[in-house]
């Protein structure tokens, strides 16, 4: 599990995993199981498009990808969505060559060169081809990207005080690289017709295109509006941002330079990761000071919500991470995973429900509400496990909670994919009292593994959980509202027939990345036509 603080675990070693099969490849297969059963001859070649929507060359730009380096849900999205779209488009990824990327077993070929600009250094472009054929371009600039720590810094996610001091340079270089590749200035034998950009770290890319007078269309996806990439106005010259762009209709945000605002202002179209969140961010409560701009985008028809999904690896019948497989018709494997989780977290044997929280341990996620609810939850016969990392203060509170309730509460500070999947598979309920949640993936993972989410009715949680059918929703971010939902969960748990009916409904009503292909393809086609980009006829 790596060198992480471990609370509530015993000294069990890898012998606990005897007989378990591990998946070591980072390449996921995102094909329909029915197509797979019919054989390769029935598969559609990558990039051939559909009868209604022709294929396009798309550069998907991201600061993280789960294949190599992941901080949160963006890493999962960046790994899965391009692969889902690859059956219909010629899509390639652009990513900084972090130390984890350079140290991976996938060969990197040097294929291009990018000139510098202002204080942004010149750099090389490498190309990696994954086992499933996905091409990833990596930005080779050791002084910017090859460091110990996460993609954003050394802190929890590196978003705040733990971020690298030169993150403005690091991610402006990524944004400029995307624009240079789109402009055909990288020396590659491939040039995108469209950019798909993700979160603040890529926000300057459409701006660099605009400042150079280029009309390459772009989609800018907001995964979490709360992280905006704010820097002092004096940094504009170093980043090659013209003085004329620092105003209310440009990159200026309350006297600061905002990467996020740049992406929203200059992109052809803005998307976010659920329909509800797309509406929420146009309000002062969730708009983070950008609600007025986002309302204008919505009024122009240039803001939409396209939900995330999960891939075929999240199948309890076949997932090799689990202690034992199971299905909606055979719960023995789910009980085996629950026994494993209880043992690993040092919990006592129990006939009561097992609650879980798999999350970044930060204020946004409502961890404080779970800590407040824990005494009542334990007193009612429940047990609780946490896995994740985040704010040091929150981690310390969780440590104290585990010490206060030995045998009933277990905490793992850190993250381990095997353990997380076993927790989804072994738990009865997943706690997600997020104050806001653009989309959320954990609730989808949990539902697929028969763990009913208990969540705040916000963002993607409201869109993917059917209250009383596939989980439980509560309306107010306070202890009373949260506890009411937990009490409903206890009641359902003790009503066996209803509990198993809800489990089955949750497992069969999953959200898959295939649902996102059509809306993204339609959007790509629309903004390309508006930009006058010539798209070849489909095959």
Image: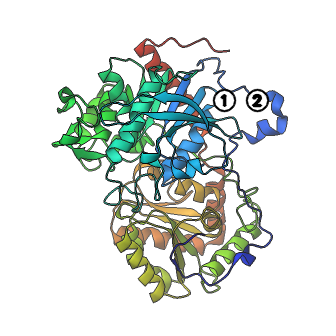
Element on which disc 2 rests = loop
**On residue 87, which mark appears?**
1
Residue placed most toward the observer, 104 or 253: 104
Q: CB atoms at circles 2 and 1 under 8 Å apart?
A: yes
Give the quadrant of residue 434.
bottom left
Dot 2 or dot 1, earlier in sequence: 2
Q: Position of residue 292 (x, y in %)?
A: 22, 37
Q: Residue under circle 2?
A: 43
Give the quadrant of residue 494.
bottom right
Depicted 315 relative to depicted 289: above or below: below
Quadrant for the C terminus in the image = top right
Residue placed most toward the observer, 251 or 37: 251
Depicted 105 relative to depicted 450: above or below: above
Q: Is residue 276 left or right of residue 288?
A: right
Q: Position of residue 401 (x, y in %)?
A: 43, 82
Q: Is residue 8 left or right of residue 332?
A: left
Q: Is residue 497 left or right of residue 518?
A: right
């Amino acid at each position: 599990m790596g060198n992480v603080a471990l609370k509530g675990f015993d000294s069990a070693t890898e012998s606990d995993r005897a007989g378990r099969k591990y998946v070591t490849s980072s390449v996921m297969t995102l094909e329909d199981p029915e197509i797979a059963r019919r054989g390769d001859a029935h598969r559609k070649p990558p990039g051939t498009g559909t009868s209604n929507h022709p294929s396009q060359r798309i550069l998907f730009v991201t600061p993280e990808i789960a294949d190599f380096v992941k901080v949160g849900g963006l890493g999962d999205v960046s790994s899965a969505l391009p692969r889902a779209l690859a059956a219909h488009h010629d899509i390639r990824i652009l990513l900084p060559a972090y130390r984890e990327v350079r140290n991976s077993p996938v060969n990197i070929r040097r294929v291009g060169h990018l000139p510098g600009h202002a204080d942004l250094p010149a750099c090389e472009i490498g190309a990696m081809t994954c086992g499933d054929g996905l091409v990833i371009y990596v930005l080779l600039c050791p002084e910017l990207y090859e460091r110990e720590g996460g993609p954003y810094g050394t802190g929890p996610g590196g978003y705040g005080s733990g971020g690298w001091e030169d993150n403005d340079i690091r991610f402006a270089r990524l944004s400029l690289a995307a624009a240079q590749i789109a402009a055909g200035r990288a020396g590659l034998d491939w040039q995108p017709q469209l950019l798909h950009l993700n979160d603040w770290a890529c926000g300057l890319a459409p701006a660099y295109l605009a400042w150079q007078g280029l009309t390459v269309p772009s989609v800018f996806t907001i995964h979490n509006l709360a992280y905006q990439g704010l820097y002092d106005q004096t940094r504009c010259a170093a980043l090659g941002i013209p003085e004329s762009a620092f105003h209310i209709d440009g990159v200026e945000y309350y006297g600061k330079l905002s990467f996020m605002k740049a992406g929203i202002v200059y992109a052809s179209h803005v998307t976010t990761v659920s329909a509800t969140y797309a509406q929420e961010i146009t309000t002062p409560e969730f708009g983070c000071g950008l609600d007025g701009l986002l309302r204008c985008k919505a009024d122009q028809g240039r803001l939409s919500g396209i939900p995330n999904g999960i891939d075929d690896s999240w199948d309890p019948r076949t997932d090799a991470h689990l202690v034992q497989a199971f299905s909606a018709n055979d719960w023995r494997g789910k009980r085996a995973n629950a026994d494993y989780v209880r043992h690993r977290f040092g919990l006592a044997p129990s006939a009561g429900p097992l609650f879980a929280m798999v999350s970044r341990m930060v204020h946004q996620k409502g961890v404080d509400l779970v800590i407040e609810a824990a005494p009542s939850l334990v007193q009612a016969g429940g047990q609780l496990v946490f896995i994740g990392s985040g704010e040091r203060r929150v981690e310390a509170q969780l440590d104290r909670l585990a010490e206060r309730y030995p045998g009933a509460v277990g905490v793992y500070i850190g993250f381990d994919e095997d353990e997380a999947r076993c927790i989804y598979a072994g738990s009865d309920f997943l706690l997600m009292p997020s104050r806001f949640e653009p989309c959320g993936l954990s609730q989808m993972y949990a539902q697929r593994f028969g763990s009913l989410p208990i969540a705040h009715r916000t963002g993607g949680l409201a869109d993917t959980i059917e209250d009383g059918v596939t989980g439980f929703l509560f309306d107010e971010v306070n202890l009373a509202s949260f506890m009411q939902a937990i009490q409903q969960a206890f009641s359902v748990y003790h009503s066996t027939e209803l509990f198993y009916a809800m489990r089955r409904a949750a497992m069969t009503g999953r959200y898959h990345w295939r649902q996102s292909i059509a809306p993204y393809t339609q959007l790509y086609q629309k903004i390309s036509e508006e930009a006058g980009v010539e798209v070849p006829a489909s095959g």
